[in-house]
Structures are given as C-alpha cells and as structure tokens.
Amino acid sequence: MLFRKPAPTSDLDLDHLPRHVAIIMDGNGRWAKRRHVPRGAGHAAGAETLRRIATCARDLGIPYLTLYAFSTENWKRPEEEVAGIMDLLERYLRETLRDMEKNRFHMAFLGDLTPLSPELRALCAQVEETSRVYTSYQMNICFNYGGRDEIVRAARSFAADCLAGKRDPASLTEADFSGYLYTAGIPDPDLIIRPSGEQRLSNFLLWQAAYAEFYTTDIYWPDFKEQDFLDAIRAFQRRSRRFGGT
C-alpha cells in the first residue's frame, strides 16, 4: 500500500479557517479526454479526489464541506455517462456506510432526488440518517441541484405558507428566506473553489455565495491534491473580507 505524504500545514492559521468550503468539482471530462480514456474514467478519478479532499477538510477541522456533484443541467449529458455517474454514486454511498464508524462524518444531500431510482433514493436516505449522529463535520453532496431551481422552490414554499396564513409576506427577511433553502441551518460558504480554469458559478449556491471568496485553479478536479486544497485555504486567509463595509 502506498502512503501519501501529509501536506504541510504549519503556515496555516488554524484559528482563521473557513467554516464552510464549497467546491465545484469540474474538469473530469477534460481530464479523461486529455488521457484518451472514457469520460467515465474521469468521473471515477474525480470520486477518488473527493475522498481525499473530504478527509483533508475533516482533519483540518473545517465543519462544512459542500461538493457540486451533479447539476439540474447534467441530465443533458449522454445517457451512458449519466448512468455511470449513478453507478459511481451508489458505490460511493455503500462504501460510506461500510466505513462510517472510521470516517465519522454526517453526509447530507442538497437537491431534488426524486428523479433517482427508488433504490438509490433509499440508499441516500439511509446514509443521511445513519450518519446524523456525527455532528462535528458535515459533507453536503449537491446532486440534481441548481441554484435557480433552489430559489424558485424556496419561493414556492414561502408563498404556500403565506396562503395558509402561516407567514406574512411583509415580514420576510433574508434570514427567513434562507430557512426555505436546501441549506437551511448551514452557514453560507466562506470559500468556493473551482478547479479546471473556469471562472463562473455555473448555477451553484447562487443565494449563499453572496459574500463567498472565490478561488480558481487550472488543475482539473481528478488532479486536485491536498496541497492544492491547502493553497486555496492559504489564499482565503490572505483575503480581506469586508462584507460591503470598509
């Protein structure tokens, strides 16, 4: 077995870590194309990166990690590729259940899971419920997730509560509306990381990203290492966050 050399963290300010890091896991397909292998191989390599980075974030003491795994637009991809992603998700969830006592983190799903097969939805629910006892670290998987879709769903829910006499439209605050989102109860991300060189949100956490720091790198997600994650944290710690003030 090959053991990875731990990435150095001595220069990090452990008292100034982001509370919530979100990652757009981008570049799997281009990674595969560059190596002349099927796109599914890129997704499989990306899943291994997910495991490494999730462990790194947990070990650092970052309470929340959110990963953009499958968007509401990704259904447009070839049927074979989508089926492969579903198989990868199932395999990852079964491994998560197997290793839960060792890894000790809560996994939650953000997004509309109704298009998934009943078996896969049941597996997602089982992982969420079984891991709920672990409260120090939460990993959120955004699956069939879209930022605009999330906001529309939240608006519909609020409107329904108003029609039922439970809420008053005139009293709505930003904090109230946040409670209708998939991320209710989760702090907004402090840092959003996007590998692969692209510099856009791609419909990810549109409401929650209002004051997040954005970090991009040309590295494709399957090649993204713990050291790259730490570099993003270092960049975050050099930023001056004023939240609209001076």
Image: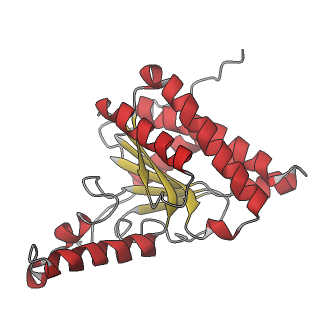
In screen coordinates, is 135 left or right of 212? left
Q: Residue at x 60, y 41 (%)?
A: 90
Q: Looking at the picture, how far across and down is residue 196, in whole percent?
A: 67, 59
Single out the residue that lies furthest toward the front: 118
Q: Nearer the viewer, residue 112 or 27?
A: 112
Compared with 156, 43 (above or below) is above
Single out the residue that lies furthest toward the top: 1
Q: Looking at the picture, how far across and down is residue 133, in whole percent?
A: 30, 30
Single out the residue that lies furthest toward the bottom: 170
Colour logic: secondary structure
Q: Residue at x 69, y 57 (%)?
A: 82
Q: Is residue 210 visible?
A: yes
Q: Looking at the picture, how far across and down is residue 158, in whole percent?
A: 22, 75
Q: Residue at x 43, y 37 (%)?
A: 126
Compared with 166, 19 (above or below) is above
Q: Residue at x 56, y 64 (%)?
A: 71
Compared with 107, 185 (above or below) is below
Q: From the image, which quarter does the C terminus lie in? A: bottom left
Q: Is residue 225 visible?
A: no
Quadrant of the image occupied by residue 95: top right
Q: From the image, which quarter does the N terminus lie in? A: top right
Q: Nearer the viewer, residue 107 or 227?
A: 107
In screen coordinates, is 134 left or right of 144? left
Q: Looking at the picture, how far across and down is residue 76, in whole percent?
A: 68, 71
Q: Nearer the viewer, residue 70 or 124?
A: 124
